[in-house]
Image: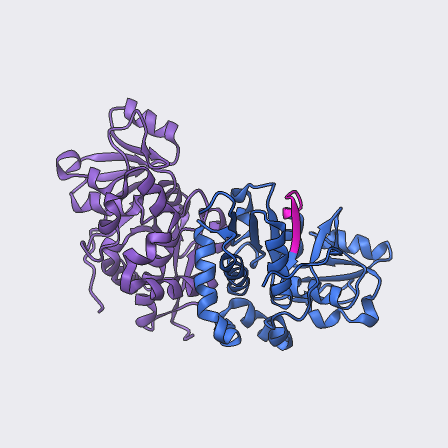
Chain colours: A blue, B purple
Amino acid sequence: MDDDQKKIEVCFSPAVFDCFHNPDAIVIVVDVLRASTAICTAFMNDVGTIIPISSANEAREYKHKGYIVAAERDGHTLDFADFGNSPFNFTSERISGKTIAYSTTNGTQAINMASSCYKVAVGSFINLRAMSNWILNEKRDVIILCAGWKNRFSLEDTILAGAIAEKLLESKSYYTECDSAHASLDLWLLAKNDIIGYIQKAAQRTRLRKNGLDDVIEFCFTRDLTDIIPVYSHGMLVKLREPVAFVN
Amino acid sequence: MDDDQKKIEVCFSPAVFDCFHNPDAIVIVVDVLRASTAICTAFMNDVGTIIPISSANEAREYKHKGYIVAAERDGHTLDFADFGNSPFNFTSERISGKTIAYSTTNGTQAINMASSCYKVAVGSFINLRAMSNWILNEKRDVIILCAGWKNRFSLEDTILAGAIAEKLLESKSYYTECDSAHASLDLWLLAKNDIIGYIQKAAQRTRLRKNGLDDVIEFCFTRDLTDIIPVYSHGMLVKLREPVAFVN
């Protein structure tokens, strides 16, 4: 590596995030099926802010306070919530200009866990190019935090981590010595020419199919639908206002 | 899957082993560089028993009690120990017929962590075929526990997990719905035709090289040098006495 190159690391589970201690790093939280894709979709549809909430009880309190609440556990919308975790729920009619309190099985906890780092952003295939370019402009170490499933490894988050790593490594201003980043990149290179085919074996793919929630698959693996970067700021997710200078 | 098929899961870090709750499963602990290879080597060289010890302090106490102690942290032999973690240290002259107290950075903790499951065995490339056949004979769910590096994912353990998974899946008596098993298998298929080449990027490969400890690399990735299965029994590792009926 060169002295001015920055480091890429990939964390496969929130349970081991502490091992990646680097408060000066940017953390990109990914939860492809479905929280991080839903958050990017909400900002495409002009949501005002999103409050990421870790516990279902806290989400219920936000409902009592009068917030619009999106909340699910294990794929199912919680009974008190206005809607659940599908990106297709976050329509302009429902959310434009509003503040949404949002709680999911894995993704929102991961966002809150990362909040002590320098910056936290939300990545998905639908903002892949913009996200990668934003990281390149930031010129900082980056940790890609895969939300996974109840602290277990997930293939869909891993291939997105690999896709981001590929773009950063191509620029030569990043390097990696992290085994999970190498593995993510190798798996992404296996998947990239037929992502939907590759992901058929993913456990979350099967869970969504069983629950009749797999209408989102094609959308969640579509690249570069938006240039929006959702970032964490003072307990909330907001749309990044800085323009992203495209490097590639 | 068929009703009588058994399940393969791969756990990438001791920190998430609790997520794989399955007390009826066999757990195969792998720590290719170097603890699990060293343990298999010790049994090839007729060690009597090995006591896996989690903490360095406890290893020191065993030394004071008069045991032969093998102990390392971060690749370096601890000052009170008789020798460290290289498989080449476990020579017949030193260990034949003896009880060794053994403590390493990652591997011995993983063995102790798994000890509440139905059976625990130690896997390495040097006993790959025998291990896979033993599992096939046991006809039970299996969790392959990668010791990793300080709770982080490691490539070398993952490709061994993939190699075991490949043999079990070929038999048709096992299936997997575990994303980390799928990833392990995909990475193994990338690596298998040139394991030494593939593993050059592994962080532990680099650590061993920096410490002048990489004379073991070729040995640690050599397949099928022994049919011995080290198994955990009452706080100790012993050589499995049952004959392994070879399925393939």
Q: Relative to B66, is B7 above or below?
A: below
Q: Please identify the quarter of the rendering in which residue B131 is found.
A: bottom left
**Residue at the spot x=72%, y=73% of the render?**
A88
Is A190 contained in the magenta span? no
Provide residue B10's location: percent of width, then percent of height. Answer: 42, 58
The reply, left or right, for residue B144 in relation to residue A3 is: left
Tell me the quadrant of the picture where the N terminus of chain B can be found. bottom left
Q: Residue furthest right?
A: A66
Please state which of residues B224 and A176 is positioned toward the viewer in this rendering: A176
The reply, left or right, for residue A218 in relation to residue A102 is: left
Asked if residue B178 can be seen in this view, the reply is: no
Q: Relative to B132, is B114 above or below?
A: above
The reply, left or right, for residue B2 in relation to residue A131 is: left
Boundaries of the magenta span: A114-121
Asked if residue A49 can be seen in this view, the reply is: yes
Is A119 contained in the magenta span? yes
Q: Please identify the quarter of the rendering in which residue A242 is found.
A: bottom right
**Number of residue marks:** 0
